[in-house]
Each structure stands twice: as structure tokens, then as C-alpha cells.
Image (cartoon, grey):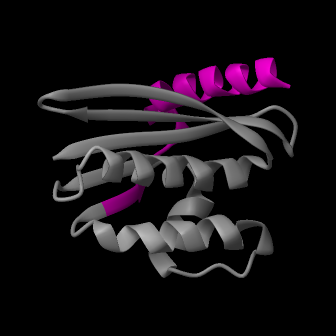
Amino acid sequence: MIKAYIDAATKGNPGPSGAGLLLVSDNLHEQIHLPLKTMSNHQAEFHAFYELLTYLIQHNYINETIFVYSDSKILVQTVDKNYTNNENFQEIFQKIQALLPNFPLLILQWIPESKNKGADQLARQGLQKALRQH
């Protein structure tokens, strides 16, 4: 079983953004921070989830039970209902939908910001990287 915490950070809205991924299991402790392009904070949350799915596939973690925790209610609700009419999320959500069938048991759950400090710190590091690239 893998627990994955994801978060995004944006300077300005929209603005340069970063993603943070924290993966924890018995024999795994990965801390990943990624710079993202200029986007809204909500878009960055979707991109953080997409980056997590991509990472899990690349490292062949697809047959694990995966609990994903995010403090983005919009992301969690959109994935739960498998639909968005917000055109700002359409493109990235379609990419997410294309990857989700790879995971037999992946549960995305909302948690309060106070329980997502590790991923938040990583997202801020990703944002710093993005700011240096501008």
C-alpha cells in the first residue's frame, strides 16, 4: 500500500507554479518537487495529480493499493464525479482520465491543508524552481 500526498503552489493566480509529491510505504519514501508552467492554483493541483499518476506508472507501482491525499476539493470532486465543465481543467483532466484505468485500486481523498504539510513544502520547493526558470 502506498500513501501519496499531493499539493501545488502558485505565485499569483495565475502565475508560476510548482507541484509536490510525497510517497510513503513500508519500503518507499519519495519526496518530489517539480516546477510547473504559469497556471492557476486549481490547474496546478490537477497537474500535481497528473504528475503523480505518471510517476507511479513509470516506476511500475500500478498494482499497489494507492491512497492519494489532496487538500484540493475541486480536484477530488472532479475526479469523484468523473466530469468537469470548467474549460480551464478540460485538457489536464482528459490526461488524468486516460491514466486512471492503469490503477485497479486508487482512492483519491480530500484532507485539510493542516494534514498536508509535507506535500505543501515540496510544492513550494517546486515553485521556487519555477521562479528561478523565469
26 in the magenta segment: no
Q: Residue 110 vs residue 93: left or right?
A: left
Residue 34 location, quadrant: top right
Q: What residue is rendered at 73% in x and 36% in y?
A: 17
* Rendering coords of residue 12 (x, y %): 87, 36
What residue do we see at 21% from left, 29% from top? 28
Q: Please, which residue is most extreme toward the left here?
A: 26
Q: Which residues are magenta?
A: 107-134
Q: Residue furthest front?
A: 58
User: What main secondary structure does the magenta stretch of the protein show?
Assistant: helix
Inspect the magenta stretch and tell me whether residue 112 lies in it.
yes
Q: Is residue 79 above or below residue 4?
A: below
x, y (%) of residue 100?
39, 69
Q: Nearer the viewer, residue 41 or 112?
A: 41
**Vertical comparison of 55 with 125: above or below:** below
Q: Whole-percent x and y of residue 130?
A: 74, 27
Name the image quarter holding the C terminus.
top right
